[in-house]
Image (cartoon, grey):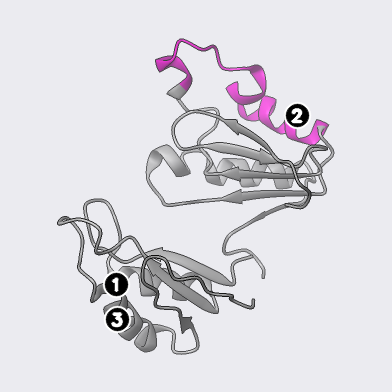
Amino acid sequence: MTGRQMSVRWLGGGVMELATPDYKQIAYLDAWVWGNTGWDRFGVQKPPEYASKDGFVQYVAGKKPEAVLVLLTHDHGDHIGNYFEMLQALAGAGLPVRTAGQGDQPNVGIVCVGNGPFTMGPEEAAQACQWLGVSQAVPVHYAHNNFVLGTGAGEQFQRALKERAPGVTTHLMKPGDTRMITT
C-alpha cells in the first residue's frame, strides 16, 4: 500500500480490512467475513457488505479497486473460513484479486517453526515454503515460551528447507535483528 494514511477496519476475530484512503488498493488480512461470528459477541449488527458473499462482492466491486489482496496468516477456520469462496467470487466478478501462492505474490515466507499447539514445526514450515514457491524464508514463532521449540528451531527449519527446497534462502534472525531483503 502506498501513501501516508491507511484505512484499517476490524471485521471481528483476526480479520482486518486495510485500504488506501481512495480504496484503490484493498487488502484482507484473513478471509472469514460473512461466516464470522465476532460481531455477535459485541452485540454489533454485521453490515450488509460483510453479511453475505454477494453483499461482500458488491461492496468491493463498488470501490473499483486496482488491486485486492487476500492474505492468510494461517489455516484455522476463524482465519481461512471464507477464503476459497471469497477468491472465486471476487475473481468471478472480474476484480483484480491476488493471494499468496498465486502467480508470482509470495517471494518471502514468514513462517512459524515453533511446533507448539496449533502451529507448524520446522518440517511443516519447510513443506509450506516448498508448496508456496517462496524464494526466501524467515522462521519465526519459536523460543518465546515453554510450549514451542527453543532457539535451535531456526537451524532445524534451515536444514529441512535445504532438503525440500534447496533454492530458498533462509534468513535466521534473533529478536531485534533487522534485515533488508530484496525480492
- Residue in view at x 24 percent, y 72 percent: 151
Quarter of the view holding residue 127: bottom left
Q: Amino acid at mark 2?
A: Gln
User: Dot 2: within a 10 Å radius of its alpha carbon, few (fewer than 14), some, or many (20 or more) residues?
Assistant: some
Q: Is residue 132 left or right of residue 157?
A: right
Q: Residue placed at 66% from the left, 50% from the top?
A: 69
Secondary element at image label 3 = helix
Residue at disc 1, secondary structure? helix
> Image height check: is 153 above or below 114?
below
How many residues crowd mark 3 within 10 Å: few (<14), some (14–19), many (20+)? some
Per the model, the C-alpha gap separating discs 3 and 2 is: 47 Å
Do tag 3 and tag 2 residues touch (Cβ < 8 Å)? Answer: no
Question: Which quadrant of the view contains residue 147?
Answer: bottom left
Which residue is labeled 2 in the image? 58
Q: Which residues are magenta?
A: 39-62
Question: Depth check: 169 or 176 in front?
Answer: 176
The residue mark sitting in front, 1 or 2, is 1
Quarter of the figure that contains the C terminus: bottom right
Q: Residue 105 appears at what percent x and percent y? A: 64, 65
Look at the numbered discs 1 and 2 and tell me whether their residues touch, using CB distance below 8 Å: no
Percent coordinates x, y for residue 169 in the rendering: 49, 84
Q: Is residue 52 magenta?
A: yes
* Drawn side of residue 39 relative to residue 56, left or right: left
Query: Left of 62 or right of it: where is 176?
Result: left
Residue at which label 3 appears:
155
What kind of residue is marked 1?
Answer: Pro
Q: Position of residue 118 (x, y in %)?
A: 26, 51
- Mark 1 or 3, closer to the camera: 3
Residue beneath label 1, please? 122
Report the amino acid beneath label 3.
Glu
